[in-house]
């Protein structure tokens, strides 16, 4: 085990991937608390899959991949925020329609771009081990923006999640904050694509807070626990990826699933022990 850890640290590829992966872990863990509080798990699935169209447009028009996908993901997220209110369509139905249509468009565009060298497996399932310097800079910019907005708006979003009527009467711009939250979900989805890909991004956006919710209740405790679970799962996943030559994104999400299962089991054991003592 110690020898494997030494080899992991000595590997230039893993060293280059570790910092971006941990940064993504912190951002997604922070965002996942709001995703769980506002019940936006299905939104993350829809936006992540719809972002394939943005990637397809970038490939077809020879545009920068991540910036183009970012704009498209934010646009889709904002459309989903506005659609239920303006068109009378339920949010899950709107998500399903945009998800299906955008993903179909993305598949057609990418498959038609026969002259382009596209790592479709990397787009779908992630590959942080092949991150370029340009991608790294874009990830750092996105991460800084997301964390800054979270620091400013998290308490307002927390209030809206549990008592929107009181939040509105107290003067909070609920509609505007809701749009901002959806847009930030779109940004975070693109942040995850390089690590977990389009298919597995929802795992990064949900599992950390799901683990934390078993133990914490306040905003501060949930955030701290979510970050700890997310970083732990990321490190374990990268170690598994290195040791067994597994895909890095799938390894990280699998590690988070294992942590959730262990956390749920430990919580159940603690609850039963407390019931027995009473």
Image: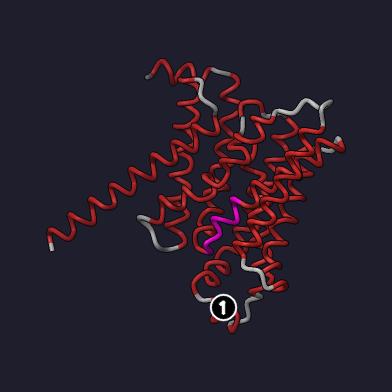
Q: According to the image, label 1 marks what residue? A: 167
Residue 105 horizontal/vertical position (percent): 76, 45
Residue 22 horizontal/vertical position (percent): 55, 38
* Side of 10 relative to 188 (left or right): left
Is residue 75 in the magenta section?
A: no
Q: Residue at x 29, y 52 (%)?
A: 267
Point out the stretch of residues depicted in magenta: 38-45
Q: Is residue 197 above or below residue 116?
A: below
Q: Residue at x 39, y 41 (%)?
A: 259
Check the picture and name the quadrant holding the N terminus: top left
Task: Tell me the SS state at disc 1.
Answer: helix
* Side of 7 relative to 136 (left or right): left
In this view, the residue farthest toward the bottom is 169
Residue 74, image quadrant: bottom right
Q: Residue at x 77, y 33 (%)?
A: 111
Residue 166 horizontal/vertical position (percent): 54, 81
Residue 55 horizontal/vertical position (percent): 75, 40
In this view, the residue farthest toward the right is 61
In this view, the residue farthest toward the left is 277
Residue 85, image quadrant: bottom right
Check the picture and name the quadrant holding the C terminus: bottom left
Q: Is residue 37 above or below residue 256?
A: below
| Crowd class of label 1 (few under 14; some 14 to 19; many from 20; radius 10 Å) | some
């Amino acid at each position: 085990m110690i020898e494997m850890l030494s080899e992991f640290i000595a590997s230039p590829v893993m060293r280059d991937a570790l910092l971006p992966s941990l940064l993504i872990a912190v951002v997604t863990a922070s965002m996942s608390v709001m995703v769980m509080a506002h019940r936006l798990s299905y939104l993350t699935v829809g936006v992540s899959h719809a972002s394939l169209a943005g990637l397809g447009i970038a490939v077809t028009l020879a545009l920068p991949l991540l910036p183009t996908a970012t704009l498209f993901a934010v646009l889709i997220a904002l459309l989903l925020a506005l659609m239920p209110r303006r068109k009378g369509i339920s949010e899950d139905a709107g998500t399903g329609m945009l998800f299906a249509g955008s993903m179909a468009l993305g598949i057609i565009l990418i498959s038609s771009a026969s002259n382009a060298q596209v790592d479709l497996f990397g787009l779908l399932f992630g590959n942080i081990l092949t991150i370029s310097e340009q991608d790294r800079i874009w990830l750092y910019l996105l991460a800084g923006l997301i964390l800054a907005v979270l620091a400013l708006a998290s308490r307002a979003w927390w209030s809206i999640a549990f008592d929107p009527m009181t939040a509105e009467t107290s003067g909070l711009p609920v509609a505007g904050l809701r749009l901002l939250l959806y847009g930030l979900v779109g940004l975070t989805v693109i942040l995850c694509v390089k690590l977990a890909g389009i298919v597995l991004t929802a795992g990064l956006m949900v599992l950390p807070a799901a683990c934390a919710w078993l133990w914490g209740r306040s905003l501060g405790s949930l955030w701290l626990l979510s970050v700890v679970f997310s970083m732990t799962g990321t490190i374990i996943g990268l170690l598994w990826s290195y040791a067994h030559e597994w895909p890095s994104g799938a390894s990280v999400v699998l590690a988070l699933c294992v942590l959730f299962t262990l956390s749920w089991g430990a919580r159940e054991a603690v609850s039963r022990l407390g019931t027995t003592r009473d």
